[in-house]
Each structure stands twice: as C-alpha cells, then as structure tokens.
Image (tube, grey):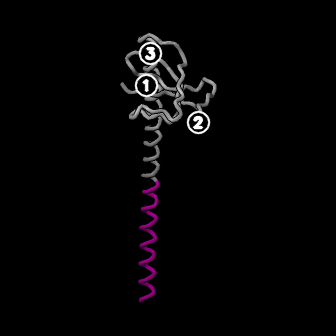
Amino acid sequence: MPYGSYEFTSRPVVKCRCGIPAALKTSMTEANTGRRFLTCKFYNPETVMRGCNYFKWVDEPINETSWLKSEIGIQKRSLERLENRCDELSSAVVRLKESGKKFSGFFKFVFLLFIFLIYKLVM
C-alpha cells in the first residue's frame, strides 16, 4: 500500500543526511496505518527508494479511530481551503466580466471615432 504525506507545522525542523528539511509523512501501510515518520524528501514511492535512506518514526502507532478523526480534520481543512479558493476565483471571474464590458464599450467608441476621422479626412 502506498504512503501518503501530510505536513505538520508544529514540529521543529529536522534535516536528513542530504541537508534539507525532512518530510513528515503518514504511513498508509496495513501494519502502521496512521503512524507518522520523517524521511528524505527525495523519497520515491514507485521505486521505494529514499534519497539518503533517512527514516525515523515520529510517534508510536495510533489506533484507527484516532487516525480517522485526524484524517477527517485534514480533509475538512483541505475542503475549506478549496471552497475559499473557489470563491476567490468566482469573484475574479465577475470582476473580469465587468472590466470586459467596460473595455468593450470603450473600444466601440474608439473604433467609431476612428471611422469618423477617416470619413472627415476623405471628404
């Protein structure tokens, strides 16, 4: 079963042997579901290789109920962020449509003025 990762910001920065901050991830294996660990950010789940082989468990195994509650909280926060972003994008679309209408009228005016000036020059 593949690993999933979640960032937890309340922990001190720990560096792997590569010298970069280690990634805090959550195990999704059957044996260690929900257990958190630090690993090199160069971890590749497809080849199961780690850049510098740095690996350290952060905590003891947690029970499934605690893990599910934690996962639900993470997903709720993610959904809230997505909903906020959706609202921001919807507002941006409305603003762009309004500004597009303003420019549309302005360009029509400029075009008609241009035609009028050409007409006056020709006549």
Q: Earlier in the sequence, mark 1 or mark 3?
A: 3
Residue where numbered disc 1 is placed: 75
Report how far apart the C-alphas of labels 1 and 2 lie in the structure. 31 Å
Q: Which residue corresponds to the image point at 49% horizontal and 26% vertical from the top-left?
A: 25
Give percent across and percent down for residue 19.
61, 35
Q: Which residues are magenta?
A: 99-123
Residue 18 image label: 2
Q: Earlier in the sequence, mark 2 or mark 3?
A: 2
Q: Amino acid at mark 2?
A: Cys
Q: In the figure, residue 20 lies in which quadrant?
A: top right
Q: Earlier in the sequence, mark 1 or mark 2?
A: 2
Q: Does the magenta-highlighted stretch encompass residue 111?
A: yes
Q: Does the magenta-highlighted stretch encompass residue 66?
A: no
Q: Which residue corresponds to the image point at 47% horizontal and 55% vertical from the top-left?
A: 99
Residue 83 visible in this rendered orientation of the protein? no
Q: Which residue corresponds to the image point at 43% horizontal and 83% vertical from the top-left?
A: 118
How dense is the environment of label 3, judged by Cα within 10 Å: few (below 14), some, or many (20 and up)?
some
Give percent across and percent down for residue 21.
59, 33
Is residue 87 placed above or below 110 in the rendered structure? above
Name the quadrant of the C terminus.
bottom left
Give percent across and percent down for residue 52.
53, 33
**Decide: marks 2, 3 in contact (CB < 8 A)?**
no
Report how far apart the C-alphas of labels 2 and 3 lie in the structure. 30 Å
Q: Amino acid at mark 1?
A: Gln
Is residue 68 placed above or below 42 in the rendered structure? above
Which tag is nearer the camera, tag 2 or tag 3? 2
Q: Amino acid at mark 3?
A: Trp
Residue 67 image label: 3
Name the quadrant of the N terminus.
top left
Is residue 75 placed above or below 122 in the rendered structure? above
